[in-house]
Amino acid sequence: MTIDRGQQRSQSSGLIVGLAALLFVPVLFVGCSTQRPLNALYTRKIPDVGHGAPSRYVVRASQYAFTTDFEMDKSDPLIHELENLRDTICETLEIRPSPMPVRIVIFENRQSYHEFLAANFPGLPERRAFFIQEGKDARAVFACQGERLRQDLRHETTHALLHSALPDVPLWLDEGIAEYFEFSDLPGQINPSHVDHLRQAVINGWEPDLPRLEKLIDLWQVKQIDYRESWLWIHFCLHHSPQTRRILLEELRDLGQSDRPFRLSDRLLAVIPDPRKEVLEHLHTLAR
Ligand SMILES: [Zn+2]
């Protein structure tokens, strides 16, 4: 995700405020998928997200309910894109997000978006988009019209799907995966901005440090370079080798287990003598 967006996790309030977004998650654990058919969701009440949220038009597609104050065609490519995103995430990460409704709220302009935030979530830092989860099943993504709407929706919806499938997703992993999926469904798609900035950082003496990322628990600690590095480690794991891909999938599978024996950095170190060197070599192989 782009770095002008941020995510904070407030331990005191029990909320997670998510990247690009503010990710408000009073309940961090969201149960794994149910077997409820998607069609049954069309009769479910869409999440109430607060005063002044656009609701004049509602378009339901798959598990999503798009609510807007401007007319949105059901054939809008954005809808199809988010439907495909779910399939891509399921196939890539071998997880099964809950099919419960996700409300996608799109504001017509930035002013109405900010007025909504001020009325419902005062005191939050300015962000271009955000994801909020309340309780077990109420999930909503907020964004506003603009040239980065597609990217923002992909990023925030990835958070929504990830949190519905996995318990206790570490901050760096959450953001790295959302960054990975925010551009396209194409496997291995790179983020050119991340590649450029990371390569320049290497020239300036920066080194990747996954154990440090794994210690991040508060979004306010996370710097732009950390989002980029998180993206790099996810890209590395998924595309370096079948072994690194399997290690990432095992990490996701084991999230939430109280006796989880390893962190991802430990898992990598067990099979790769120098993961830091390998991830840097991976960075330099990425085509621009
Ligand atoms: Zn994010």
Image (spheres, helix red, strand yellow):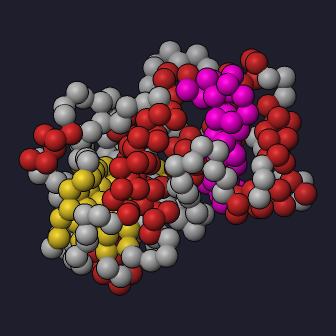
Instruction: Decide which of 11, 241 is in the foreground and name it.
Output: 241
The quadrant in which residue 124 appears is: bottom left
Residue 247 belongs to the span the image colors magenta: yes
Specify the quadrant of the image occupied by residue 273. top right
Which segment is the magenta one?
221-249
Q: Quadrant of residue 239?
A: top right
The percent coordinates of residue 119 (x first, y second) are: 26, 74
Q: Residue at x 11, y 51 (%)?
A: 45
Which one is in front, 257 or 158? 158
Regarding residue 208, the answer to whether it shows in the image is: yes
* Near-viewer residue (183 or 230): 183
Asked whether, in this view, residue 262 is left or right of residue 145, the answer is: right
On screen, residue 280 versus residue 190, left or right, reads right
Taking the view exactly as shown, the residue that stands out farthest to the bottom is 111
- Expressed as whole percent of the image width and height from the top left, the position of residue 76 reads 33, 66
Name the image quarter holding the C terminus: bottom right
Q: Quadrant of the N terminus?
A: bottom right
Counting labels gives 0
Q: Answer whether residue 233 is magenta in the image.
A: yes
The residue under the point 25% across, 63% down is 74
Give the main secondary structure, helix, strand or loop, of the magenta stretch. helix
Tell me which residue sits at (67%, 53%) in the image.
190
